[in-house]
Image: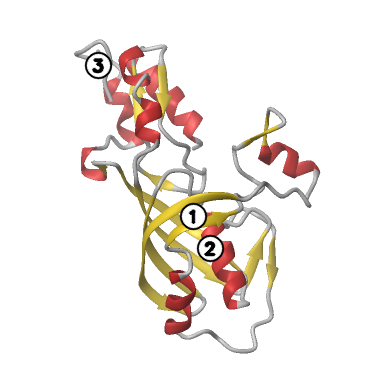
Amino acid sequence: MTSHDVVDAVRRATGQKRVGHAGTLDPLAKGILIVGVGRPATRQLGQLAEKEKEYVTRIRLGFRSTTDDGEGKKEEVPVTAIPSEEDVRRALDRFVGVISQRPPAFSALKLQGRPAYRLARKDNSLQLAVREVEVKAIEVVVYAWPFVEVRMVTGPGVYVRAIARDLGEALGTGGYVEELERTRVGSYTADQAVHTSELRRLRDCRVPRPGGL
């Protein structure tokens, strides 16, 4: 499901026309998507999009991907020396703090008024402008070549796919996101969430206030 698909499902389940979300999740990803229902709630979404976020991701080394994730076309990278866990940790340390990041070409960012991914389908050399973002913490959870599982806390606008790509370039191995889960947005966590499979039970629901999250 895309984030837009989730918004449509909530719109159908609640009977509310004004529904929006506070930050896109890639179709490959799972996890927390903040959805506002009703005018007062949707007005808060811009502020919520600026909250810090926490992710757990599984990165596949040894390959590059045209989309920087598992959905793109893969190219194997010859690796003569497998990086150690210390090599991986040192490389990841470079991405903590305020960093310059080039967003993936296959993203929903607007370029010339159109989503970048539509332009990238026609021009495989498309590169988006570098911008400053903040990564607050990165922790290696498990490393077993060619996979590294990472937990990270970020500010707004960070692309985990770009970190996977740039980690692979720093190690000389290539890299892309194989799995991604957003585990927190601000104070919102999974135990407060409604799974998409449960949306049918909301069909008779009416928001108790003029709007709610």
Tell whether label 1 touches label 2 (CB within 8 Å): yes
Q: Residue at x 45, y 77 (%)?
A: 90
Q: Which residue is drawn at 52% across and 60% down?
A: 163
Q: In terms of secondary structure, where does tag 3 sit? A: loop
Q: What residue is shown with label 2?
A: 164
Q: Nearer the viewer, residue 116 or 75?
A: 116
Tell whether label 3 touches label 1 (CB within 8 Å): no
Tell whether label 3 touches label 2 (CB within 8 Å): no
**Is 188 displayed left or right of 146 in the figure?**
left
Which amino acid, by three-letter code, is at mark 2?
Ala
Q: Is residue 14 above or below residue 144?
A: above
**Precedes in sequence: disc 1 or disc 3:** 1
Which amino acid, by three-letter code, is at mark 1?
Val
**Is 191 displayed left or right of 155 in the figure?**
left
Distance Cα–Cα, label 2 vs label 1: 6 Å
Which amino acid, by three-letter code, is at mark 3?
Cys
Quarter of the image where one finds residue 143: bottom left
Q: What residue is shown with label 1?
A: 160
Q: Crowdedness of circle 3 by 10 Å Cα count: few (<14), some, many (20+)?
A: few
Distance Cα–Cα, label 2 vs label 3: 40 Å
Q: In this view, does 6 lie above or below 172?
A: above
Q: Crowdedness of circle 1 by 10 Å Cα count: few (<14), some, many (20+)?
A: many
Q: Which residue is drawn at 68% across and 72% down?
A: 76
**Position in image of residue 53 (x %, y %):** 35, 47
Q: What residue is shown with label 3?
A: 205
Q: In terms of secondary structure, where does tag 1 sit? A: helix
**Position in image of residue 47 (x %, y %):** 36, 30
| Quadrant where the C terminus is found in the figure | top left
**Is 94 displayed left or right of 151 in the figure?**
right
